[in-house]
Image: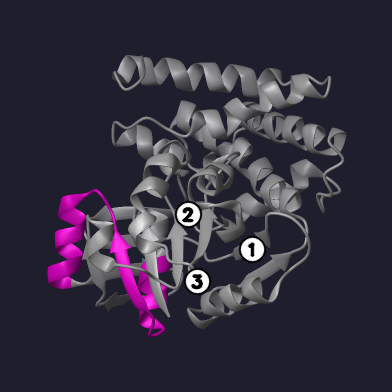
Amino acid sequence: MKIAIVGCGAMGSVYAALLADAGHEIWAIDSWKGHVEAMRTKGLHLEGASGERTVRLHATTDPAEAGPCELVIIATKAMHVEQAAIASKPLVSNDTLVLSIQNGLGGPDTTARVLGRDKVMVGVVGGFGASMRGPGHAHHNGWELVRLGEFSGPVTPRLETVAEVWRSGGFRVKCFDDIDQLVWEKLICNVCFSGTCTVTGLTIEEVMNDADTWQVASGCAVEAYNVAKARKINVDIDDPVEYVRNFGSKIPKARPSMLLDHLAGRMSEIEAINGAIPPAAAAVGTAAPFNTVISALVRNKERQMGVRD
């Protein structure tokens, strides 16, 4: 299958390398010119939980160079989705399927608004702990699960087709009838570790092993869980604290992408993750003090870094 991956950062590079290794025609599209040039000349090197490999693929900063694709994966961070979706229009024909994969809330809705809701499916990926080691070189600590769903209604044949593409690359995949379930099950994990690791500079394991920090991190998760239950979202979670600890134990040495953004001097996805919980909580009559404080501290760090007004 001809596949474009728009936003070929750490996670996008994992997707690109493993799907290219499976024999698909991969177009890695990213604005980082050094990364694109490295992939063009040396290939894309991936190491970590899936093993080590260097794959050849197409790489470009210009989506028009790739032309229409059968599958377009929007893999940018939440705040860059609209720009990425607009740039992706040359990749999309009448028969193109689009899969939007972001942390937090709102990314797929933005993709659907730009490219058409009928074309867009939703992906939620967890347990990878991916990072860039340099241009053309990515690493991932885990290899847990790719969750896929349609915007509404049950699993469709086209969704199963996309699932098989992922499976061909060695990914473990589950398809869901309920999109809200898959989004919120991942969000509960994100809010636990993303903001807390970013504020403290700790790895996931270090957060879990420090009693004070874990009180804050698990408190963020419980608040998100309470919102999901109040919204009658069918999350398959009995104990949210045990759930996020089990998640974290699979990638203990990982540093969430939000922390990696700060270490690289970039603005984070705080508004789509921890920052999305307080307004969602207010809408259902619950409170979210842990997420409110963590979000405020991350915003303050970004103002000090000069990446937020």
Magenta residues (range): 15-42
Label 3 – label 2 distance at C-alpha: 33 Å
Q: Kindly identify the residue that appears in the image at 86 percent across and 33 percent down.
A: 230
Mark toward the start of the polypeptide (3 vs 2): 3
The answer to whether residue 284 is magenta is: no
Residue 168: x and y, percent? 51, 82
- Numbered tag placed on residue 192 in the rendering: none
For label 1, the SS is strand
**Residue at which label 3 appears:** 95
Q: Kindly identify the residue that appears in the image at 58 percent across and 40 percent down.
A: 104
- Numbered tag placed on residue 129 in the rendering: 2
- Residue 15 in view (yes/no): yes
Label 3 – label 1 distance at C-alpha: 19 Å
- Residue 209 in view (yes/no): no
The answer to whether residue 22 is magenta is: yes
Query: Dot 1, crowdedness within 10 Å: few (<14), some or many (≥20)?
Result: many
Q: Kindly identify the residue that appears in the image at 21 percent across and 72 percent down.
A: 43
Q: Which of marks 3 and 1 is in front?
A: 3
**Residue at which label 1 appears:** 148
Quick check: 239 left or right of 72?
right
For label 2, the SS is loop
